[in-house]
Image (spheres, rainbow, N blue to C red):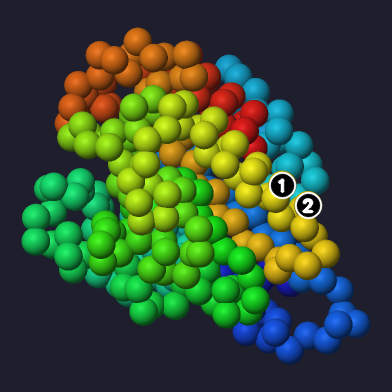
Amino acid sequence: MPRIITRREFVAATIAAAAIAPSLTLAQPRRPNILFILADDLGYGDLSCYGRPDYQTPNLDHLATQGVRFLNAYSASPVCTPTRCAFITGRYPARTRVGLEEPLTEKADLGDKVKTLGLPPEHPTIASLLKQGGYETALIGKWHLGYLPNFGPVQSGFEEFFGIMCGAVDFFTHKDMQGNPDLYEGKVPVERIGYMTDMLTERAVDYVSKRRRRRGSARPFYLSLHYTAPHWPWEGPHDQNVSRTLGRGRDGFTAGGSLKTYATMMKSLDDGI
């Protein structure tokens, strides 16, 4: 019977591998690229490989047949900010102040706390450690661990960032619950046209493709792809009319929705992956 590896052993091994990587000789195999994909508010029962009956997720099902499908797993937290804090730091969420916040509210709601509430830039992260080990690092998608100018992916070890800072945006306008634009390239606000899931997919494909073309001289890469789907608002790829009538505030963002809409959001996510 194979030995069960604990979460602590897994995290320790990952950090150790990153730390010793620069000392590897040229004779040893090239270090692997790492693509980590995180869906937002996805339940295990939302995938057909776990028994979802009303729609299919064939691409994720295929990954499950080629890899590992967890039947008994531990989560440091079931909600947005603490989950991300746990993964990125490798520690229990409560070890940092931001990991105790749920929800980490919109920037305007935080007031003066916006300057002090976030993942401290000096705190080691999986990105900063892999970067020290010679990896290119990027985050595409949702951050939700503090707001600019004091906090953000670029301050926490990610060399590139394209995505949102807050907890949820409209899939078409890319505005937060208060109606403020929330889409960034690095630390710079940007405007783009497109359905959020598709935009993140296309950006990730472009990131990987560019590095494959210069494979011989490129550093290995670590890409964190943090989709906003299937988190509300309930908008599938063809729900522009829903977007136009969506009210502001949490009540507006969480209003409506249906199993049919959720299915279209999940199919879009599965296609992108």
Q: Amino acid at mark 2?
A: Arg
Identify residue for label 2: 213
Q: Residue furthest right?
A: 27
Classify mark 2: residues with Cα within 10 Å, few (<14), some (14-19) or many (20+).
Answer: few
Residue 132: image location, x then y, percent = 57, 80
Q: Which mark is residue 209?
A: 1
Nearest the viewer among 246 and 68 is 246
The vertical placement of 165 against 118, above or below, is above
Which residue occupies 77% across, 53% down? 212
Q: Tell me: 26 left or right of 10.
A: right
Quarter of the image for residue 61 reads top right
Q: Quadrant of the C terminus?
A: top right
Disc 2 is placed on an element classified as helix
Q: Amino acid at mark 1?
A: Ser
Q: Which mark is residue 111?
A: none
Which residue occupies 57% across, 26% down? 268
Residue 221: image location, x then y, percent = 66, 63
Q: Is residue 44 visible?
A: no
Q: Tell me: 57 left or right of 179.
A: right
Q: Residue furthest bottom?
A: 23
Disc 1 is placed on an element classified as helix
Q: Quadrant of the N terminus?
A: bottom right
Classify mark 1: residues with Cα within 10 Å, few (<14), some (14-19) or many (20+).
Answer: few
